[in-house]
Image (cartoon, grey):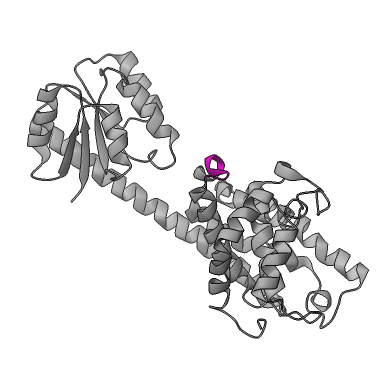
Amino acid sequence: MKIIFAVDDNETSRISAKSALDKIYAVYALPSAARMFKMLEKITPDLILLDIDMPEMNGFEILEELKASPKYSTIPVIFLTGRRDSAVEIRGFEMGVIDFISKPFSPPVLIRRIQTHLEIDKVVKQSLKEVQNLHNTVISVIANLVENRDMVTGSHIERTQRYLEILVKELLRNKIYAEEIADWDMTLLLPSSQLHDVGKISVKDHILNKPGKLTDEEFAEIKKHSSEGERIIDEIISKTEAGDFLLHAKRFAGYHHEKWNGTGYPHGLSGEDIPLEGRIMAIADVYDALVSKRPYKKAFTHEQAVDIIMKDSGTHFDPQIVEAFLNVAEEFWAQSVKSPGEDFI
C-alpha cells in the first residue's frame, strides 16, 4: 500500500485528508514540520500533501529542506492551500512542488490527482532505472574488457568494488566526510569504481602482463594509466549529454594513486585536495594488491596488509579513512576470499 503524509496544522484539514484517503492509502496525518521530519527518519512516503501556511516552518521552508536532502528530494510534494495566486504557484513549481490542491478540497478530486501523480512518478522511476541499468551495463562491459587484458590482477575490479562499499558505509556510520558522501548516489558510485583502471587499456600487453618485476621505464608506462583513464572518461563525458554518471569514475581513475603527502601520481596532489573518491579507492586498491600474489611478489597476509596501511596513515593514506578501514578490515578479508583464484594465498 502506498504511503501518504498529510502535513497540516489545521486539525479539520488533517482529518478530512485522512478520511478521504485511508481506504486506498496508508495515511499519516501530521500537525507540523517537526513531526514530519521525525517520521521521515522511520518511513519514506510515496507522496507528501503539504499545507503552505503553518507556524514555525511554512510549506515553502519545508519544501526547501526536503529538496536539499538527497534522501528526501525525490519524494513528490503537493501543496494544499486555501490561497491561490500566480506568484505562489510560480514559486512552488520553481522549487519542485508537483501540484496545488485548493482547500477545502473535494475527496474524489484529491484521490484522482494523487493517483495521477503516483502513476507518473512510477513511470519516471522506471525510466530512470532503465537508464541506470544501461549506464551500469556499459561500465561493466568496458571494465571487463580491461580486466580480461590484464592476466595478472585476477578479479581485482570485483573485489575493490566490494571493499569500497564497506568503507563508504563505515565512513557514514562514523560521520567521516558524511556531508560530502551524503550527496553521492551510491547506485552510480559503486558501479563507476569498476573503471578505476580503465587507463590500462592503453598499456602494451608485454608490459601489462610481464611475468616479473618491471623496469623503471616499464613502470613509468604503467603509471600513465591514471592520467590515461582520466582522459578516456573525460572524452566520453564530452561526447554525451548523460556524462554526469561518469564523474565518480573519472575521480576514481585519475586520483587513486595520489598520496596524502603529495608524493603520488599523476597530479602530485596532497591532503584533501585529492578528491575523496581517490582517497577511498587508494586504500581498497592497495589492500587488494598487498593480499594478492603477483609475478614479482608473494601475497602478504591480511594482518601484514593491515599493518602496512596503518603505518602509511598520514603519508600515503588519509588518516581519517585509515581509521574507518581499521574498523572494517576483517570485512575486507571476508570479502576478498569470496573470489580467491590463483592470485591469493
Q: Is 307 situated left or right of 336 in this image?
A: right
For residue 87, above or below residue 324: above
Measuring 52% from the left and 58% from the top, which residue is drawn there?
135
Q: Residue 332's x, y, as percent?
A: 57, 68
Res 239 visible? no
Query: In the depicted view, which residue is nearer to us: 316 or 203?
Result: 316
The question of residue 178 being in magenta is answered with yes
Quarter containing the C terminus: bottom right
Q: Residue 270's x, y, as percent?
A: 77, 45
* Quadrant housing residue 140: bottom right
Q: Which residues are magenta?
A: 175-180
Q: Is 34 situated left or right of 291 in this image?
A: left
For residue 234, above or below residue 331: above
* Quadrant housing residue 143: bottom right
Measuring 53% from the left and 39% from the top, which residue is drawn there?
179
Measuring 22% from the left and 37% from the top, which residue is drawn there?
5
Q: Residue 219's x, y, as percent?
A: 86, 68
Query: In the depicted view, which residue is nearer to us: 69 or 102?
Result: 69
For residue 96, above or below residue 268: above
Q: Is 148 situated left or right of 138 in this image?
A: right
